[in-house]
Image: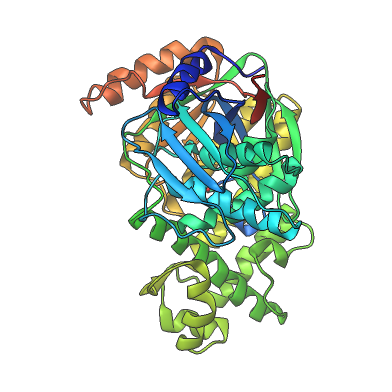
């Protein structure tokens, strides 16, 4: 049952903006936080996220033609309209309508492969996930659009398949993301985190302890998915890919698609061994020129740019690359994520907290995705009684999370207000939340 008060007021707005037309379905797609497993997904290693009780909501009615009309309750996002097809040209970079187009183009292709042509729809969108904050509001919009379009066209797609397709589909906006956000959005369940493995996607729900919750605090640093953050993200993808090439050469094998392809079994020993091999290959150098990096991959610089750099969605090659620290993070994070899922399953919450602390250190030092504000939030949450704390999502701003007993939440909130938000001259309101795992995306008929 997803129809709530929010949908009631949306229904009135829907009828107003679409000239008295009545919506046929309500769609709800949640945001997420990731407990652990950061930047592991596109490398083929697992993640452990959970859905949160904040979502993108959509009311939908079918249209006869192939046009999608989007209206947003928030006036910052103006009306958008586009035609469905196998190739949908994007709006300007950063436009909110591109997330809907990403989903639509992917489903139009799926439908065409099944010999169908999609009809369009009227959509009224509303939501309460903080935007550009790393809580996956954009993926929630992608998933909501996909579910809406599939529903109005009676196009049947299993949630796992839809999750994989939407992960790929989101590359439309230019970020070479992995599949975590789409998977948890579609496959989450209340009171459970989701351990997700990739290629192929497999989800295992893990009970979340009943007396605990996750405090999430906004660093107030914008974590937009476009512009220089997109480049910073894609650069990490490239550095990991580079690690694949260097290690494959060392191992005398042809390079697999991603880091996980270098180990049949991702045991902690094997993961440590791979880091050791990379350290040997790079002579322990954390930063290498492009020329030296290409050489270690066994490629000419031009070849490296053509074959490796352009695949990561970068328009121009970087001057320096950091394959060693980036892969060291990914390998150690993969081991921590496996361990955290097992510990959570056994109710060993304090150990999960310890692993989250280690994850933050590795994200900050080796992956270089933290910032002063995130480090500060993490420190305050720990000092105020969180069992562990870390940044969550892509990083470079956005939210930090702390795992805590429910009874500690008000003390943590107070500490954050006094020691972070006051000194940054910001409001606590709208920046701090306490989450328990929420349900995944759903569609409900209004008839
Ligand atoms: C973003 C991406 C995810 C994942 C995280 C980092 O949220 O969309 O696929 O890579 O960053 O863990």
Q: Is residue 362 visible?
A: no
Image x and y of residue 8, in percent: 51, 14
The residue under the point 65% across, 58% down is 109
Left or right position of 379 against 172? left
Left or right position of 235 against 202? left
> Which image quarter: residue 28?
top right
Left or right position of 347 against 95? right
Q: Residue furthest bottom?
A: 300
**Nearer to the camera, 67 or 228:** 67
> Which image quarter: residue 355?
top right
Left or right position of 330 against 343? left
Assign the C terminus to one quadrant of the image.
top right
Image x and y of residue 29, in percent: 58, 31
Q: Is residue 367 above or below residue 253?
A: above
Q: Is residue 263 visible?
A: yes
Assign the N terminus to one quadrant of the image.
top right
Q: Is residue 307 above or below residue 330?
A: below
Q: How many marks?
A: 0
Coloration of the structure image: rainbow
Image x and y of residue 202, in percent: 76, 45
**Nearer to the camera, 268 or 131:** 131
The residue under the point 23% across, 29% down is 424
Image x and y of residue 19, in percent: 44, 26
């Amino acid at each position: 049952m997803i129809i709530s008060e929010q949908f009631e007021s949306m229904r009135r707005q829907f009828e107003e903006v679409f000239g008295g037309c009545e919506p046929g379905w309500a769609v709800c797609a949640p945001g997420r936080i990731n407990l652990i497993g950061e930047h592991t997904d596109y490398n083929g290693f697992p993640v452990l996220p959970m859905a949160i009780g904040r979502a993108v909501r959509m009311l939908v009615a079918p249209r006869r033609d192939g046009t999608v009309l989007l209206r947003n309750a928030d006036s910052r996002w103006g009306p958008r309209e586009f035609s469905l097809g196998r190739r949908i040209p994007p709006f300007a970079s950063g436009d909110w309508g591109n997330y809907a187009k990403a989903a639509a183009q992917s489903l139009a292709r799926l439908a065409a492969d099944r010999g169908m042509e999609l009809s369009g729809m009227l959509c009224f969108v509303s939501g309460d996930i903080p935007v550009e904050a790393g809580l996956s509001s954009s993926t929630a919009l992608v998933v909501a659009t996909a579910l809406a379009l599939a529903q109005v066209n009676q196009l049947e797609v299993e949630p796992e398949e839809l999750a994989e397709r939407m992960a790929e589909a989101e590359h439309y906006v230019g970020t070479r993301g992995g599949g975590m956000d789409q998977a948890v959005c579609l496959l989450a369940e209340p009171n459970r985190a989701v351990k997700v493995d990739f290629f192929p996607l497999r989800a295992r729900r893990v009970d979340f302890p009943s007396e605990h919750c996750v405090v999430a605090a906004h660093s107030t640093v914008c974590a937009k998915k476009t512009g220089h953050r997109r480049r910073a993200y894609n650069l990490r993808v490239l550095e990991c890919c580079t690690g694949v090439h260097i290690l494959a050469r060392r191992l005398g094998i042809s390079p697999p698609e991603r880091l996980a392809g270098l180990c049949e079994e991702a045991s902690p020993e094997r993961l440590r061994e791979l880091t050791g091999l990379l350290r040997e290959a790079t002579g322990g150098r954390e930063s290498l020129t492009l020329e030296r990096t290409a050489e270690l991959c066994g490629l000419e610089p031009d070849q490296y740019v053509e074959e490796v750099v352009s695949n990561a969605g970068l328009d121009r090659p970087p001057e320096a690359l950091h394959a060693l620290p980036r892969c060291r993070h990914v390998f150690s994070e993969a081991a921590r994520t496996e361990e955290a899922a097992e510990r959570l399953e056994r109710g060993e919450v304090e150990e999960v907290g310890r692993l989250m602390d280690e994850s933050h250190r590795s994200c900050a030092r080796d992956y270089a995705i933290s910032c002063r504000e995130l480090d500060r939030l993490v420190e305050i949450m720990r000092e105020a009684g969180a069992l562990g704390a870390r940044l969550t999502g892509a990083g470079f701003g956005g939210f930090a999370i702390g795992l805590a007993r429910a009874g500690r939440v008000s003390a943590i909130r107070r500490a954050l207000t006094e020691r972070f938000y006051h000194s940054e001259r910001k409001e606590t309101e709208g920046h701090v939340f306490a989450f328990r795992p929420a349900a995944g995306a759903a569609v409900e008929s209004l008839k």
